[in-house]
Image (cartoon, helix red, strand yellow):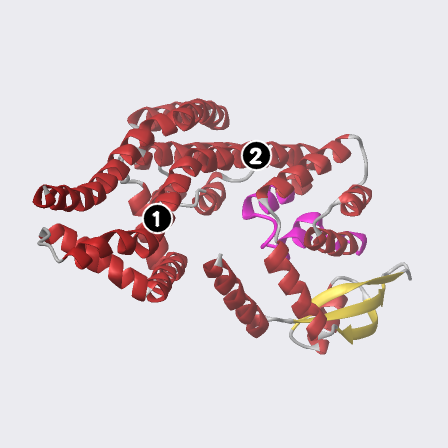
Amino acid sequence: MKSLWLYKLYRLYRLYELMRMKFHFQAKNSEGEVREGKIEAVSRNEAAMSLQEKGLIPLALEKEDQSMAFLRDIERIWNGVSQQEMAVFYRQFATLIDAKVTIVVALKAIEEQTENRFLGSVLIEIIEDVEDGMPLSESMARHKDVFSALSINMIRAGEISGNLQKSITFIADNTERNYQLNSKIKSALMYPGFVVSAAIIIGFIVFTVVLPKLTKIFGDMNVEIPWYTKLIMETGNFMQSFWWAVLMVMLGAVVGAFYYLKTDAGSEEFDHIKLNLPILKRLFKFIYISRFSENLGVLLAGGIPIVKALMIVGDVVDNSVYRRIILRAAEEVKTGGTMSTVFARYEEFPPILSKMIKVGEETGKISEVLKNISAFYDQEIDRMAKNMTALIEPVLIVFLGLGVAVLVFAILMPIYSITNQIQ
């Protein structure tokens, strides 16, 4: 919790440094209608030029209060927009558009009922932009902290093809499936995470409070005790005297690990670790493959060129190992090759996957093949998530049992020895 608070504080500081100026404007369009809204620019002159490029004649430009903008950024960091909220937003948006409701009216209806204040403020800005004649995709691109590159490009493709309704429906389905996939991951890791956390807390309390009281008996009786019991006693005495220092070291380790994982080197190393963890590596592998095939299939079905689609999916897959492979596939396709030939060279992609993609490339039904691949791996992830507890539980029991056995042996053996000496 503390590490999350520190990270958010750091992000606030960075946002304050990088903040651009925002201007409230009033302007006339070619038909003489007055428009109002907000625009970002590094200066008042640039803001006026940007409005003129959009066919608007500036009437008034007022610089937004920086303290208010900063407060909005605070709201963005602390509230944010969860994946579940985005899934609900896209489903509502798709339903309203499917009912032939205009974009502005649909967004206003969603904004009025959303409980997330930050999302509501973002929707208000998008509504203003669309009313001023800006394409929906371009307005969404101004809020990349809320809308993913995949969503923005799908909306843009729908605007170009004239089939925006289909694109929004695609995004809604895709967002819901990604949310369900992440929920499966969390549910699979929740049990072992809880057990390990509880074991650490209980162990800290035992060594700090319980053990020093038990081992004090041995010191008072002045009897000879084994070396391993002495080690336990010294550890308990140290923990009792310097528990605060141990707690600070533990918290420091957590914070340090958290920040290291936020760096490029740390994130990349953790991506490799996930693909080599016993028991869990197969689950992670299936998750990345499912995420790759699902998102690439959606982009290709939405009319996004394959090279651009691969580059977008490289970021969406959220693993540096798979990202490099996917970007290499994009380079291969750009030079006239096929992505199946690249995937066939890497063990991260099963042989059957590259063969199925090759069939899709040869038949021109690559998006349908990717959809089938995603469905297959989703079923596998479901099965593995349900069995994850059964797979991990024996390992946890063994490690916890060993820890308890060491403590019991170290304490009971001297007590047994003292009993024999008294007799």
Q: Tag 1: residue type?
A: Ile
Instruction: Report how far apart the C-alphas of labels 1 and 2 lie in the structure.
Output: 38 Å
Predominant SS of the magenta segment: helix
Q: Which residue is at 63% across, 64% downward?
A: 74
Specify the quadrant that holds the C terminus.
Answer: top left
The image shows residue 288 at horizontal and vertical percentages of 40, 37
Residue tagged by mark 1?
A: 200
Q: Which residue is at 32% across, 50% downward?
A: 206
Residue tagged by mark 2?
A: 174
Q: Which is nearer the N-term, disc 1 or disc 2?
A: 2
Quadrant of res 110: top right
> What stretch of residues is rendered in magenta?
129-156
Question: Can residue 323 be seen here?
Answer: no
The image shows residue 240 at horizontal and vertical percentages of 31, 61
Judge by depth and name the residue closer to the eye, 55 or 391.
391
Give above or below for 95 relative to 221: above
